[in-house]
Amino acid sequence: MGFSMHPYGIQSMLKEGHKHLSGLDEAVLKNIDACKQLSTITRTSLGPNGMNKMVINHLDKLFVTNDAATIVNELEVQHPAAKILVLAGKAQQEEIGDGANLTISFAGELLQNAEELIRTGLHPSEIISGYTKASSKAIEILEELVEKGSENMDVRNKEQVVTRMKAAVASKQYGQEDILCSLIADACIQVCPKNPSNFDVDNVRVAKLVGGGLHNCTVVRGMVLKGDAVGSIKHMEKAKVAVFASGVDTSATETKGTVLIHSAEQLENYAKTEEAKVEELIKAVADSGAKVIVSGGAVGEMALHFCERYKLMVLKISSKFELRRFCRTTGTAALLKLSQPKADDLGFIDSVSVEEIGGSRVTVVRSEEGGNRVATVVLRGSTDSILDDLERAIDDGVNTYKAMCRDSRIVPGAAATEIELARRLKEFSFKETGLDQYAIAKFAESFEMVPRTLAENAGLNPMDIISKLYEKHASGNTNVGIDLEGGDSEDGVCKDVSIVNIWDLYVAKFFALKYAADAACTVLRVDQIIMAKPAGGPAKRDQPAGMDED
C-alpha cells in the first residue's frame, strides 16, 4: 500500500505549484535585494556625468541612453517588489518629466539602509514610522530651501526659463545643454497659451533627421512632415487649406449597381461623367479659395490630375494623429468627404514648402501669424540612437517647462539641497526619542547618495567631497554644491550654486522625495509573498514597451 502524505498547513489551502515566501529572510530581505539591484543599474546614470546604458528590448530594438525612465521601461522588470520602484519612477516621469532616476536610486538607497537596520534588530514597522516622520520633515525643510523670489516668474522670459531647465537637460546631454535649452525655450514660449498652466506638452513636436550636427538644429513655427508633396507643386505662400480626412478620390457608391451598356458611345459618356464629376468636386474646392489640399488617405490619379490643373498643392498625411495636429496648427476643420468646404472650415498657413534636409525630403508647414499652436524642433545628428537620446532630452525639457508653468519655485541644484536635507534631518533625529531616531538618521544618510554618486560618476573622491560639503553647510552657506567643471579655486569642486547657476525645480525634488519614500515604505510593509501557480496557455503579450500612441 502506497503511503501518501496529505499536505498540511498552507500547502493544503492553495493549489499545488504555488510559491509561498514569508519571514524576514525570505520575503523582506529578498525584496530589498531586488530593489537594490534595480537602483544599482540606474544609479550610475545619475547626473550630468552619468554613464549610458545599452538596453536591447524583446523586439531587438537598441536603446543607448542614460534616461532612467526609458531604461526601466525597456527592462521588463519581473520581480514584484522591484516593479513598485519602476512604478514610482514612471509616476515621477509622468508628473514632472525629470527626476525618475533620483526617485529610483533614492528609494533603493532607503531600502539598503533599512536592511542594515533590520539586521541590527529593528522591526520593519518601526523603520516605516521613522521614514514617514523623516519624509514629512524633509518636505518641510525643502520648503525653507526655496530660493527667495523664485515663485514669481515670467514664463515667456527666455532667460528665466533656461535657468530652470538647464539642470534637467544637462543630466541627459551634458555639454550640449546651452544649445538645447535655447531651442526648447524658444519652442515652448512660442506655443505657450495665454494661461500658462494650460500648456500642452504635445504642442512641441520633434522631427528627427539623420545627418548634420547639433548646430544645424532649428525651431520651426508650425509642423515638419516627413515626406514629399504629392503633385508637382512644391511651394505655396499665404494659402488657405482644406483638410479631407478620408482621402481625395472618387468614392465607390454604397449600393452595388449594374450598368448595361449597349454601344461604344454610351461607354464613352459613362467614363466622361466620372471625369466630369471629379472635376466638379475639385473645382468646387478651388472656388472656395483653398490653395492647399491635405488628404488623410490615398489621392486618386484622376483627382490629382485636376488638382494640378487648378494649381492646387496636395499633401498626404497618413497618420491620423499628425492630421489632428495639422488641423490644430492651421485652425482647419477636417472634412469627412470630398465636397465644397465652407469658409470657416478652411485654415490658413503662411507658407508650405518641400525642402531637402540632409538627403530626406520634408514638407515644412509654417504658420507664424495665426495662433502659434504647434512648434517643431528639427533635430540633426549622426545616428538614430543619438537622435533618440536628444529627443528624450527635449521631452524632459518640455515637461520641465510645463512643471514650471504650474510652480516655478527653485531649490539649489548640484546636490546642495540633498546635503542640507541630510544635515538638518540628522539634527532632527537627535531630538527624537524612541527607536524612530535610528530610522530618521538612516533616512538622512540616504541623501548622501546624491553627492556621492555625482562625485563617483565624475571620477572624484566622494568621501572627501561629502565632508567638505558638510563643513561648508555647517558654517551657514546652504547653497554650496558640487561643480563638476571647475576644480581650480581653493574650494576644489565645492562651489556656491548661485554663482554657477545650477537650480532644480522644487516640484521635481518634492515628488521624487515623496514617491521614493512611499515606494520604500510599501516594499518594507510586505512580510509574505504568495504566488499562485501561473495560468497555463500561451503567454499573453503586453503592448510592446517603448511604443507611443502615434
Image (cartoon, rainbow, N blue to C red):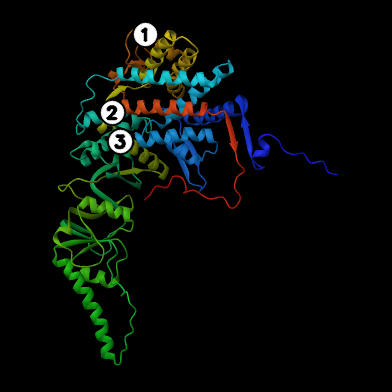
- Inspect this view and state whether residue 237 appears: yes
- Between 545 and 119, the one lying in front of the other is 119
* Distance of label 1 from label 2 (alpha carbons): 27 Å
Horizontal side, residue 98 vs residue 354: left or right: right
* Distance of label 2 from label 3 (alpha carbons): 13 Å
> Which residue occupies 46% across, 9% down?
433
Amino acid type at image mark 2: Arg
Density class for disc 1 (Cα within 10 Å; few <14, some 14-19, many ≥20) is few
**Residue behind mark 2:** 164
**Residue behind mark 3:** 180
Query: Are discs 1 and 3 less than 8 Å apart at CB?
Result: no
Task: Mark 2 vs mark 3: give the one in front.
Answer: 2
Give coordinates of residue 426: x percent, y percent: 43, 12
Amino acid type at image mark 3: Leu
Horizontal side, residue 427 vs residue 346: left or right: right
Q: Earlier in the sequence, mark 2 or mark 3?
A: 2
* Distance of label 1 from label 3 (alpha carbons): 36 Å
The answer to whether residue 184 is above or below residue 299 is above
- Secondary structure at numbered mark 1: helix
Density class for disc 2 (Cα within 10 Å; few <14, some 14-19, many ≥20) is many
- Between 529 and 415, the one lying in front of the other is 529
**Residue behind mark 1:** 474
Give coordinates of residue 278: x percent, y percent: 23, 74
- Secondary structure at numbered mark 2: helix
Give coordinates of residue 88: x percent, y percent: 43, 33
Q: Earlier in the sequence, mark 1 or mark 2?
A: 2
**Label number found at residue 181:** none
